[in-house]
């Protein structure tokens, strides 16, 4: 699915969302920063945009995990670039400098972290890709210390009877064409995939189900923020 995407991902994620992705990401980062974490896990980190934003905002060390090696490699490249821009020290040199941002290939369903070992966890655009969202939420919650923030960003289907048909038209008709024109065939595939993927996910797992699922996974005090006419949703809560 993600083959052929990493090179243009950062640019096209913004263009094709009309620059809303960065607003949603900022809201997610605000939620995590409120917990004043020292170590954050960022799951489905992709090209490390969230990891970089979290580090820049909080100064915390970040461990990012992604299933796709190509996305993670691009993430590593972005982290190194940021280092050149004096944002983060990255590599672990012989002298033992600390990792500010470390990336690894791993599945959100099975994180290589001990119970309660991070202060906070973020995950973005993940649950539509997993077979069992409830079990994945439990796994994400498992690695967060009690009281730590868990925060998520995901697309959503607008509720408004005015915006929903326009959203439908955009995701079903415009997005594949815009993807093709801006990114070629891999982005055409994404454009075709995304709308149905979002709709089908919420058919099976409406927002109310998700709120209950967070509770069942051991995450309480959950706040939901719908953004951009309902096209994006940021959720966060505290590990019980
Ligand atoms: C749309 S990208 C989002 C990347 C990044 N979070 C961002 O907002 O820029 C979704 C990412 O989820 C990753 N992913 C999909 N399923 C996953 C899983 N089961 N475990 C970990 N990562 C996964 C993909 O490889 C991809 O990099």
Image: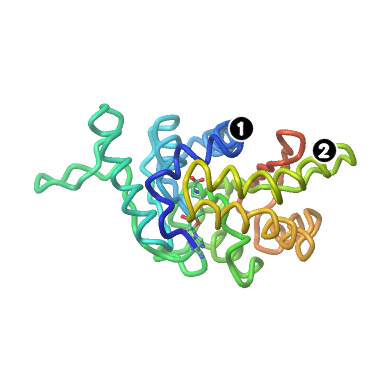
Residue receiving disc 1: 18
Residue appearing at x 40%, y 38% in the figure? 52
In this rendering, position of residue 164 left or right of residue 37: right
Of the numbered discs in the image, which one, if any, rests on residue 111?
none
Q: Position of residue 123 (x, y in %)?
A: 54, 51
Frontmost residue, 156 versus 162: 162
> Can you say which quadrant of the picture contains the C terminus?
bottom right
Frontmost residue, 18 versus 154: 18
Q: Position of residue 149 (x, y in %)?
A: 57, 45
**Number of other residues with Cα within 10 Å of mark 1, as a class: few under 14, some 14 to 19, many 20 or more:** few
Tally the marks: 2
Which SS class for mark 2? helix
In this rendering, position of residue 103 left or right of residue 230: left
Residue appearing at x 61%, y 32% in the figure? 18
Q: Position of residue 206 (x, y in %)?
A: 79, 58
**Number of other residues with Cα within 10 Å of mark 2, as a class: few under 14, some 14 to 19, many 20 or more:** some
Residue 225 versus residue 140 in the image, above or below? above
Frontmost residue, 166 versus 103: 166
Residue receiving disc 2: 163
Spatial CA span between label 1 and label 2 = 15 Å
First along the sequence among labels 1 and 2: 1
Residue appearing at x 46%, y 66% in the figure? 107
């Amino acid at each position: 699915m993600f083959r052929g995407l990493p090179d243009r991902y950062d640019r096209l994620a913004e263009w094709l969302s009309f620059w809303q992705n960065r607003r949603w990401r900022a809201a997610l980062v605000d939620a995590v920063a409120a917990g004043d974490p020292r170590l954050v896990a960022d799951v489905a980190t992709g090209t490390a945009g969230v990891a970089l934003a979290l580090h820049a905002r909080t100064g915390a060390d970040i461990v990012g995990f992604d299933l796709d090696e190509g996305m993670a490699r691009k993430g590593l490249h972005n982290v190194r670039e940021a280092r050149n821009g004096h944002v983060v020290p990255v590599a672990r040199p012989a002298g033992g400098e600390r990792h500010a941002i470390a990336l690894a290939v791993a599945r959100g369903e099975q994180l290589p972290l001990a119970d309660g070992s991070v202060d906070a966890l973020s995950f973005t655009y993940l649950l539509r890709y997993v077979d069992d969202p409830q079990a994945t939420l439990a796994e994400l919650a498992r690695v967060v210390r009690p009281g730590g923030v868990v925060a998520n960003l995901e697309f959503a289907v607008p509720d408004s009877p005015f915006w929903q048909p326009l959203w439908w038209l955009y995701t079903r008709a415009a997005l594949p064409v815009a993807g093709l024109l801006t990114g070629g065939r891999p982005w055409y595939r994404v454009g075709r995939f995304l709308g149905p993927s979002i709709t089908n996910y919420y058919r099976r797992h409406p927002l109310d189900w998700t709120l209950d699922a967070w509770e069942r996974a051991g995450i309480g005090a959950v706040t939901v923020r719908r953004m951009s006419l309902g096209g994006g949703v940021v959720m966060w809560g505290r590990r019980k």
